[in-house]
Image (spheres, rainbow, N blue to C red):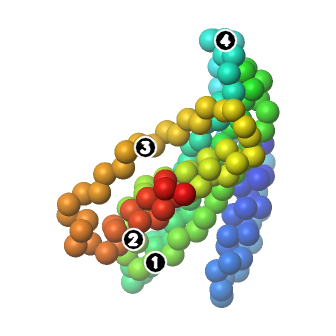
Amino acid sequence: MAENMFLSSFIEEVNKISNLTLKVEPQERFKKIYEGLWIDFDSIFPLNFNFMVCDGSKGVTEFQGGIKVLYARALVHFFKAQTFMDKFVETKIFVDHLLQKEDSYMKAVELIALKKALEKVDDVLAIYDGSLYPTFPLSALNNEKIAKAKIEEFKALAA
């Protein structure tokens, strides 16, 4: 399943952070629970076009003193009509003091994943679960942390 692909990508991102070591032991029981949650909708509605679907998830760890670590990941599934063809993953780790707007960072990773997947496949409809018309709240103009997250999201959207 894609969980193995995420694990290797996660380890690559962790290795980019200096002075950090990590030992990961995937647990088969949780992997089976995760895989069991996927529901097959193949037979509900006939599809005769190619499409990609992207979705993301995140995890946040906060340390004393306000340091936050955000792990964001995105998974793109590619289908030809009703047949699953391939999957693409993207992961990224963000570390900052008083990190905010975790959802914006996750949306940026989703958009990056979708863009990379689209570069590999022609004639496909791309489905992104986030808003394609992001808003920038007025209060964020004075908040550097929110602005930083939104800039990351906008850069990914504009790329």
Cα–Cα gap, marks 1 and 4: 46 Å
For label 3, the residue is 132
Q: Is residue 101 left or right of residue 82?
A: left
Vertical comparison of 16 with 109: above or below = below
Cα–Cα gap, marks 3 and 4: 26 Å
Cα–Cα gap, marks 3 and 2: 19 Å
Counting every numbered tag in the picture gives 4
On residue 63, which mark appears?
none
Label 2: element kind:
helix
Label 3: element kind:
loop
Are the residues flagged by discs 2 and 1 in contact, CB closer than 8 Å?
A: yes
Q: Nearer the viewer, mark 1 or mark 4?
A: 4
The residue at the point 56 percent across, 51 percent down is: 110
For label 4, the residue is 46
**Kind of residue indicated by mark 4:** Pro
Q: Position of residue 92 (x, y in %)?
A: 60, 64
Q: Is residue 128 visible?
A: yes
Q: Nearer the viewer, mark 3 or mark 4?
A: 3
Q: Position of residue 70 (x, y in %)?
A: 51, 66
Mark toward the start of the polypeptide (2 vs 4): 4
Q: Dot 2 surroundings within 10 Å: few (below 14), some, or many (20 or more)? A: some
Q: Position of residue 74 (x, y in %)?
A: 61, 50
**118 and 68: which is toward the camera:** 118
**Kind of residue indicated by mark 1:** Asp
Mark toward the start of the polypeptide (3 vs 1): 1
Mark toward the start of the polypeptide (1 vs 4): 4
Q: Nearer the viewer, mark 3 or mark 1?
A: 3
On residue 148, which mark appears?
2
Q: Dot 1 surroundings within 10 Å: few (below 14), some, or many (20 or more)? A: few
